[in-house]
Image (cartoon, rainbow, N blue to C red):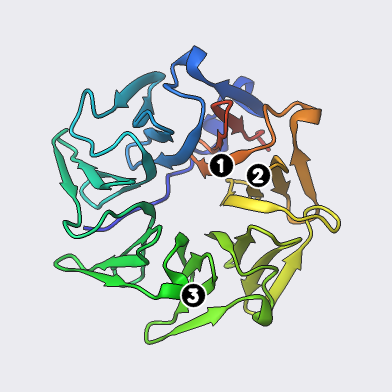
Amino acid sequence: MFFTFSCEKIPDNLKDSSATDKWTLFNTATGLPGNQVRGTFCDSKDNMWFAVSGQGVAKFANGSWTYYRTSNSAILSNNVTCIGEDADGNILLGTTNGVSILSSSNTWSSFRDQTKTLYFTCFETDKDGLIWAGTYGQGFLIFDGAEIGQVFYEAFKDVNDIESDSKGNVWVATENGLLKWDGSRFSVMGIAEGLPDDVVTALYSDSRNRLWIGTYFGKTVSWIDSQGIHQLALFNDRIVEINDICEDAAGNIWFATYTSGLIKFDNVVPYAYKKYNGFPEDDVLTSTGDKDGNVWFGLYSKGLSRYSLPIN
């Protein structure tokens, strides 16, 4: 079993030009079961999945909504925190009480640790097909297809994100620095090694082989490439609390933030979308792209905002 995290891009010449370069808001008035969206995911069948705070998970497919809650399914908890998919098309739902698995034939199974409660935060697969699953308070788990092992260091017990890069390294974002697994050993990065802050909240490996690193108290975001570590100031001398990072089909990098809205970096200059210039709110929790080239942003209290890229 392994997870996949990408969706196919539709050719620009097949897109409806009237639906591009456009923002669309989804909320409870348009079928979303709640207005706080903590997770977004596009599966291999091009369905969109959304972890809605306290309301389970919502699937958006062909313009219609399907909801999975404890009241109508075998999902372990309505508090879904992250979403993934395995090679067989089974949907994996990380919750505050274990992992629920919805098979491609619509049957449910689950994984729970009988000795402790596992609050899952993220999933990632490495170059060898090992599955890394981050938790809050219990480090991270690694699944090799047969056995599950736990990696726990007291200093790095709270995991916010996990990302593998183009060289096969696995990076683990924690509340006390950034761990790097090079295939044989762990090393640690923090302020002393050039990061803007030790509380690392978001990671993203982009199409240019840059590993982007977001933090909670940093005044810059960082990226690592073959030349070393670099800094990008999103606001002059202001702390930017990064929740999530993604890339769109045009190569723009998007930063979902607390209080600073949504920030797009077009690889030249950053641009902020905030309430003052028409964005629904300034607290953005999560982001992902779909197969049509749209980018979806989960909001703290206003639902979902979807951006459709313009046709070049």
Q: Is residue 93 above or below residue 59?
A: below
Tell whether label 3 touches label 1 (CB within 8 Å): no
State the residue position of label 1: 285
Quarter of the image with the C terminus is top right
From the image, tell me which residue sits under label 3. Answer: 179
**Circle 2 sits on which residue?**
258
Q: Residue furthest top?
A: 29
Image: 16 above or below 218: above
Provide the secondary structure element on which disc 3 rests.
strand
Q: Cβ–Cβ below 8 Å for labels 3 and 2?
A: no
Q: Marks 1 and 3, Cα distance to the nearest angstrom?
A: 23 Å
Give the residue displayed 28% in from the left and 28% down from the top: 68
Q: x and y percent of residue 33 in the render?
A: 41, 21
Estimate the spatial distance between the alpha carbons at disc 2 and disc 1, rounded to whole Å: 7 Å
Toward the viewer: 234 or 110? 110
Residue type at mark 1 is Leu
> For residue 218, which quarter of the picture?
bottom right
**Does residue 88 appear left or right of residue 24 in this picture?**
left
Q: Earlier in the sequence, mark 1 or mark 3?
A: 3
